[in-house]
Image: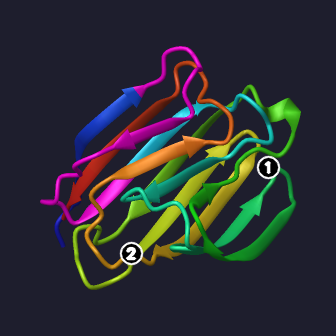
């Protein structure tokens, strides 16, 4: 089995905190999988980072099941059913809002037409850990991705997008 390689397709670093949305258009279709990395602080403990593809953020085109803990011994699992966006909930209290969080979104077979796209999100931070598995109901190739934040991205937050080979 070949060792996967990650080729950087794009990157954005937030300067100031006046934006709540980042879009990468024209995703390179020569890769099999897509990995998106977010590293940054939370500006408000109740805010969420969300993701959607091809400009589709309505109509329940995403579904997933979540397992999470709060950094102690609390654990819960639940089914989101259908969603308008893929949510990454990683903030549990105001005391955690100044901590750096890392989130990985992995989307498999994003270039294939005629099938749904499975995904995994992994969140690691001071507020706890979250794992979501699900699928993108869009059966066409994914050509753009938008990450939006219910508040504003924090100054210095970085989003990187990689094409995966192997």
Q: Position of residue 13 (x, y in %)?
A: 43, 24
Give the position of the N terminus as an image quadrant.
bottom left
Please, which residue is most extreme toward the left here?
30
Q: Can residue 30 be found in the magenta stretch? A: yes
- In-image side of 29 versus 108 (left or right): left
Q: Residue shown at 27%/58% (left/top)?
A: 143
Q: Which residue is mark 1?
A: 71
Left or right: 11, with 57 as reference point: left
Q: Is residue 83 above or below residue 24?
A: below
Q: Nearer the viewer, residue 161 or 102?
A: 161
Q: Residue at x 87, y 61 (%)?
A: 74
The quadrant in which residue 7 appears is top left
Q: Which residues are magenta?
A: 13-35
Label 2 belongs to which residue?
138
Q: Position of residue 37 (x, y in %)?
A: 44, 44
Q: Is residue 34 left or right of residue 120?
A: left
Residue at the image point whose x is 49% and y is 16% from the top: 15
**For the view shown, which residue lies furthest in the top direction?**
16
């Amino acid at each position: 089995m070949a060792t996967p390689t990650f080729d950087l397709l794009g990157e954005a670093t937030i300067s100031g905190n006046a934006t709540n949305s980042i879009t990468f258009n024209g995703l390179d279709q020569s890769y099999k999988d897509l990995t998106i990395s977010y590293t940054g602080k939370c500006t408000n403990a109740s805010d969420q980072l969300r993701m959607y593809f091809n400009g589709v953020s309505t109509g329940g085109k995403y579904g997933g099941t979540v397992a999470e803990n709060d950094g102690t011994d609390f654990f819960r699992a639940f089914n989101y059913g259908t969603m308008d966006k893929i949510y990454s909930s990683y903030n549990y209290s105001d005391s955690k809002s100044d901590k750096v969080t890392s989130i990985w979104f992995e989307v498999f077979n994003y270039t294939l037409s005629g099938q749904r796209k499975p995904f995994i999100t992994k969140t690691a931070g001071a507020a706890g850990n979250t794992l979501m598995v699900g699928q993108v109901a869009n059966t066409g190739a994914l050509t753009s991705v938008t990450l939006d934040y219910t508040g504003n991205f924090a100054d210095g937050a970085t989003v990187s997008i990689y094409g995966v080979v192997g």
